Image (cartoon, rainbow, N blue to C red):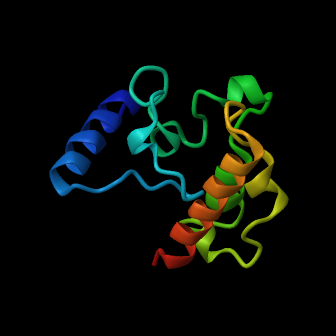
Amino acid sequence: MHAISLFCYQEIFERMAGKKIENPCGYSCSDCHHRGNECAGCKPTEGKPFWIGYAGVECCPVYDCCMNERSLPHCGRCPDLMCEKFTRFRDPEMNEAEALETLAGMERVLRNRK
């Protein structure tokens, strides 16, 4: 299935179900202002969201580790959660306190996810 059509289907399904988009890292694309305009999200792009071009990587290291290397459904199943790959990248518009709060929230979500 083409990435954009998968994205549209996923968006419609999630609106109907009232669910947030869950990524392997615990971040939800549901409220991201890049979603739809310049990014379809991690799952439809197979770990190649819009920001990788700015970070100088070919694939999100968290997605690659979780999905490709370890074959885990999400980082909450990883014994190394909060590793360097998980904490390396952050939104450059966030200050240190916001970044730490966001990471803590992602960790909570992941540890509670089945």
**In this picture, residue 88 sits left or right of residue 92:** right
Question: Residue 39: where, in percent of width, then height?
Answer: 48, 28
Q: Between 105 and 30, which is closer to the camera in this rendering?
A: 105
Q: For the image shown, how many numbered marks are present on the structure? A: 0
In what quadrant of the picture does the N terminus appear? top left
Q: Is 7 rendered above or below residue 104?
A: above
**Residue 20: image x %, image y %?**
35, 53
Which image quadrant for residue 24?
bottom right
* Residue 28 in picture, x, y percent from top left: 46, 50
Residue drawn where x is 46% and y is 36% of the image: 32
Q: Is residue 23 above or below residue 70?
A: above
Q: From the viewer's side, name the closer residue of 111 and 58.
A: 111
Most extreme residue toward the left is 16
Figure quadrant of residue 40: top left
Vertical order, 10 against 108 (above or below): above
Residue, far top: 37
